[in-house]
Image (cartoon, rainbow, N blue to C red):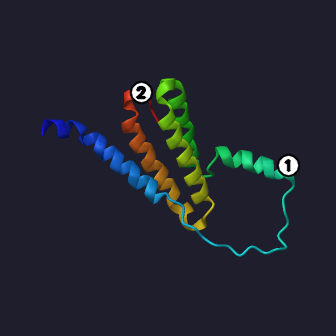
Amino acid sequence: MKNFSSKFPYLIFCVASALLLVSCAKSELTTNRDATTPTASPAATTATATASATDVGVPECDAFIKAYEACVKDKVQAQFRAPFESTLATWRKTWHDQAANPQTRAALATACKSAREQATTSMKAYNCTF
């Protein structure tokens, strides 16, 4: 039983992370776009793509992502960064997609705060503060 209890916090973190990712999954919506909608210029499209690649559009999420990214970059050894960077990319894309959907945007700040709390605990080993 001693061996299980030493792994229990890790198990809790894994389950909580999985639940967070599942709850943040994008629900597919079909849209009926009007064919007369004007298209953006290539320069405007590039600027939008650049901004959307780095920002979610929800202050709680953007602040957490920047803090987490800085922690990983500054405090996690290079050979161990890949899974952290993968998680970061998943969060960024999922949250960006959810921020674009009015039905899921409202709950996004709470999800990002929850992810921050979980990361505060899980990243203590790297002396990260959020």
Q: Amino acid at mark 2?
A: Tyr
Q: Are the residues at dot 2 and dot 1 in contact (C-beta closer than 8 Å)?
A: no
Give residue 49's position: percent from left, percent from top.
Answer: 73, 49
Which residue is depicted at the point 64% across and 46% down? Answer: 55
Residue 52 place in picture, x, y as percent: 68, 49
Q: Earlier in the sequence, mark 2 or mark 1?
A: 1
Residue drawn at x 40%, y 48% as measured from the top left:
17
7 to the left or right of 45: left
**Left or right: where does residue 17 sit relative to residue 3?**
right
**In the orientation shown, which residue stands out farthest toward the left?**
1
Question: What mark, if any, has residue 92 been given in the picture?
Answer: none
Q: Give whichever of 55, 30 is nearer the camera.
A: 30
What amino acid is at disc 1?
Answer: Ala
Q: Nearer the viewer, residue 13 or 59?
A: 13
Quadrant the N terminus occupies: top left
Residue 11 pos. (x, y %): 29, 44
Q: Which of the 4 image quarters holds residue 69? A: top right
Dot 1: few (<14), some (14–19), or many (≥20) neighbours within 10 Å?
few
| Residue 26 drawn at (x, y percent) | 54, 61
Residue 123, above or below 36: above
Helix, strand, or loop for circle 2?
helix
In three-dimensional space, the C-alpha distance between marks 2 and 1, rounded to whole angstroms, equals 40 Å
On screen, residue 35 above or below 85: below
Which residue bears the numbered disc 1?
43
Residue, x 52% and y 57% (percent of image)? 108
Circle 2 Cα neighbour tier, 10 Å, few/some/many (<14 / 14–19 / ≥20)? few
Q: Nearer the viewer, residue 86 or 106?
A: 86
Residue 75 higher or lower than 88, as above or below: above
Q: Is residue 43 left or right of residue 115?
A: right
Residue at left offset 44%, top offset 57%: 22
The residue beneath circle 2 is: 126
